[in-house]
Amino acid sequence: MRDEMLKDIISEENLVYKKTDLMTDNVLSYCPGCGHGTAHRIIMEVVDEMGLQEETIGIAPVGCSVLAYEFMNIDMQQAAHGRAPALATGIKKTWPEKFVFTYQGDGDLAAIGTAETLHACNRGENILIVFINNGIYGMTGGQMAPTTLSGMKTSTTPFGRDTALMGNPLKITELVAELPGTQFVTRQAVHTPAAVRKAKKAIKKSIELQRSGNSGTTFVEIVSNCNSGWKLPPVQANKWMVENMFPFYPLGDIKVNGELVK
Amino acid sequence: MGELKLMKGNEAIAEAAIRAGVDAYFGYPITPQSEVIEYLSSQKPEERTGMVLLQAESEVASINMVYGAAGSGKKVMTTSSSPGISLMQEGLSYIAGAELPCVVANVVRGGPGLGTIQPSQADYFQATKGGGHGDYKLIVLAPASVQEMADFIPLAFDLAFKYRNPALILSDGMIGQMMEKVELFDQVPRRTEEEIKKTCPWATTGKPKTRERNIITSLYLDPGTQEQHNYKLQKKYRKMEEDEIRYEKIECDDAEYLFVAYGSSARIAQKAIQLGRKKGMKIGLLRPITLYPFPVPQIREMIPRLKGILSVEMSAGQMIEDVRLAVGDKIPAEHFGRLGGIIHSPTEILEALEQKIIGG
């Protein structure tokens, strides 16, 4: 009975959603409720829809998404912590026709890799940088990130981030938008179907710009959650993100066609 | 005969890079090797061969640009001097772990720290013992002339691609800065994209439907898998030790005393041999050309005919450890060398032989 029901549900005419072939069948290593899986999927969906599997080279960082190449069915390289934009530069400069992107977390991109990030953007490397910002170091167990909010508790700021000692949360996305080398800079999220659609559109726009040979870096920040690091159940983590992260990291386009959005 | 030119060692590296069909050079200026990137910049390599030239924001970035391009099958290199090479150790460890071919040249200066810009050979340990974290080796070539600065570029790439392992050219500020006659080899064409895909089937060139995805990584979280990966690397290094030792023997046939010296020190030691032989001392020189793999069997083979060995190196005594591993306690083996950017004279070397070995 159950098998028949399943058969009916997955029959061709009832098909409303199908996992893209560009995601492998490997079980995601992310915590339940984490945004990484969705972010992976929308990038791979766009690459699939645009027929670019053979033209795509991705760079995985150090952090929770260190194993991104286990899930994305494309050629990928794993970078040292923070160095992904340098690897992407090396590849894009020598394979200018390929679509090259990095996928990096906040510690990777905005702390240890700040120099590589700023200089790749400043040179206007024609690459896409996808920046997952959840304000915490997920993989190492919930320590303070450069994007950790003021007063936010982490395992290295158990009494809350003291900005007098530890500095202020770094809005690196606004920073790279100031550089002439970036052409499209946007901040998105993947916590609701509507947000996912918008984020996917931003990814698509970035790939189209790179494919058109339009020189300049495209930069898509995705504000995401870390229910393990934040010590909140998935639904509450998303609620906390909307109430606390979004006011400091507001969603929307920051730079379009090389012009800052007013 | 190839084109003859009077060049600095650093310029010879740069010209050889273009002629060897290198796809990209990523570098960062540092004395005493800045002429490499300056010469390349003056040559418009984009126009000459299509070679990419980029001044990176740091040595950390340079080596990671090399890592990226090497992972995608390109023939790619960087150069630096000691403090910059220290910054590259992270990248080199990843590149060795991910088994990628690339070439790095170190035009060594005196250290530690910021040290001095004068020549030194004190980066031997760093070059030959791995340098970064983990169990790995670089193939290390030691040029002793401007000619070899040029010739070792294609040789280093051949070895790097043969073993899918980074190759390091360990030079010093003297060879980098001095000018000598060089016979340049003819231009080698850069490989086409199709040739790269064919000869580097492991490279990230974009996944077609016809093959599995290519992944370049040094991450094997499961310790059992990581151990197997390490065994694979070690097997490769043993193969290098069997097949790739390169060396030169000078006046060794009747030698009772042996200098072991590479690079600049080998040049100076040759003069010391001339001075010593005038005094009736039978001295020879074994010049390791590959510092890794080190010519252990070649030194061992000479031991029965020798009374002693002096390892000559502009360091406090680094290569001497490899010489002693080869020699054991069979005959005396000592070190001599000036430090911190001072170049020893032939007379000093000869005196050291007399005091430490002959009189010792």
Image (spheres, coloured by chain):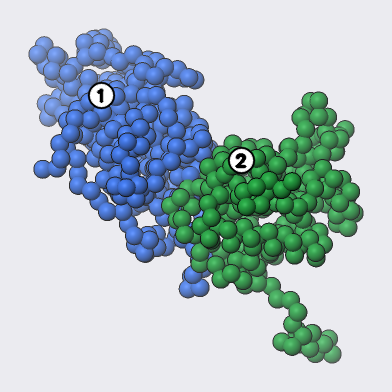
Chain colours: A green, B blue
Position in image of residue A4 (x %, y %) = 80, 90
Q: CA distance from mark 1 to mark 2?
A: 42 Å
In the image, taking residue B295 as reference, residue B129 lies left or right, namely right
Q: Which residue is mark 2?
A: A179
- Measured as percent of width and height from the top left, residue A98 is found at 49, 59
Q: With respect to residue A44, does B48 lie above or below?
A: above
Residue found 44% across the figure and 47% down from its top: B234
The crowd level at tag 2 (other Cα within 10 Å; few <14, some 14-19, many 20+) is some
Q: Pick whichever, B52 or B229, lies toward us.
A: B52
Dot 1: what SS? loop
Q: Position of residue A157 (x, y in %)?
A: 82, 34
| Residue in the picture at 85% in, 50% down | A241
**Three-letter code, disc 1:** Met
Q: Chain of mark 2?
A: A
Q: Which residue is tagged 1? A: B178
Residue B97 visible in the displayed image: no
Q: Residue at x 63, y 38 (%)?
A: A114
Q: Which residue is at the front of the view, B55 or B320?
A: B55
Q: Residue at x 79, y 45 (%)?
A: A249
Query: Do badges 1 and 2 share one subunit?
Result: no
Residue B246 in the image: x percent, y percent?
A: 25, 39
* Residue B199 falls left or right of residue B232: left
Identify residue type, mark 2. Leu
